[in-house]
Amino acid sequence: TLVDNGTIEQSIRDLVTIRASQINGCAFCLDMHIKEGRIHGERELRIHHLAAWRESTLFVPRERAALAWTEVLTRLPEHGVPDDIYERVRTQLSEKELSDLSFSVMAINAWNRVNVAFQTVPGSSDKASGLDKANLSSVAAAAAPPPAVSKELVESSGEVDDEKSLPCGPGGQ
């Protein structure tokens, strides 16, 4: 396809699809593209840092340009892309690369909207898509109960006074 055969390297396409899916709140696409990224060799810590890429030291200028472009196209401002963002991105990407990246961003935004609208279940097509190779099954993880945080353990740390202060709410969940 045009998106897969473009000039943008796979590692950047992985970062872009994950970041757009975070912004759009698409759990299915986020799950899928994190798994794809891991299969392609993306480091787990970089995936964790994507939501805060501006503050992270883990991304090179070319990746930062791609992430900035992804965000501005995903959250298109009322008056279009600001000139300073366009110029900053163009210092890292050629016109052809910028065009290819734009098509990648357009594609993931469309897929995000479809999968959010139809409430596609994360992990539901892992086996068919070969994503089970990532060994990150969200379907099996959803069936398992979350790990409990003992009230006694947390209280012994001196950090809480009651159950409402436990991490993630009552019972640690």
Image (cartoon, helix red, strand yellow):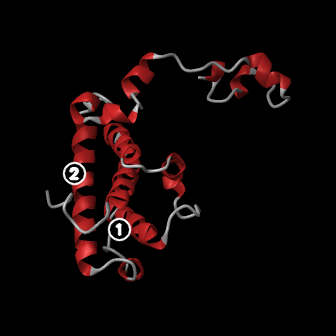
- Locate residue 10 relative to residue 5 in the image: left or right: right
| 102 w.r.t. 141: above or below | below
Q: Who's the residue at 42% across and 32% down the image?
A: 136
Q: Who's the residue at 37% across and 61% down the image?
A: 12
The residues tagged by marks 1 and 2 sit, at their Cα atoms, a distance apart of: 18 Å
Q: Residue type at mark 2: give it.
A: Ala
124 or 75: nearer the eye?
Answer: 124
Q: Residue type at mark 1: give it.
A: Pro
Quadrant assignment, res 65: bottom left
Task: Provide residue 22's location: percent of width, then percent of height.
Answer: 41, 48
- Tag 2, which secondary structure? helix
Task: Provide residue 132's location: percent of width, then percent of height.
Answer: 33, 31
Quadrant assignment, res 114: top left
- Locate residue 172 relative to residue 139 in the image: left or right: right
- Locate residue 49 relative to residue 18 in the image: left or right: right
Quadrant assignment, res 131: top left
Q: Residues within 10 Å of mark 2 (few under 14, many from 20)?
A: few
Q: Nearer the viewer, mark 1 or mark 2?
A: 2
| 154 w.r.t. 3: above or below | above
- Tag 1, which secondary structure? loop
Q: Residues within 10 Å of mark 1 (few under 14, many from 20)?
A: few
**Can see residue 122?**
no
Q: Which residue is mark 1?
A: 77
Q: Which mark is residue 106?
A: none
Mark 1 in CB contact with mark 2 (< 8 angstroms):
no
92 or 132: nearer the eye?
Answer: 132
Q: Which residue is mark 2?
A: 110
Task: Provide residue 112's location: percent of width, then percent of height.
Answer: 27, 46
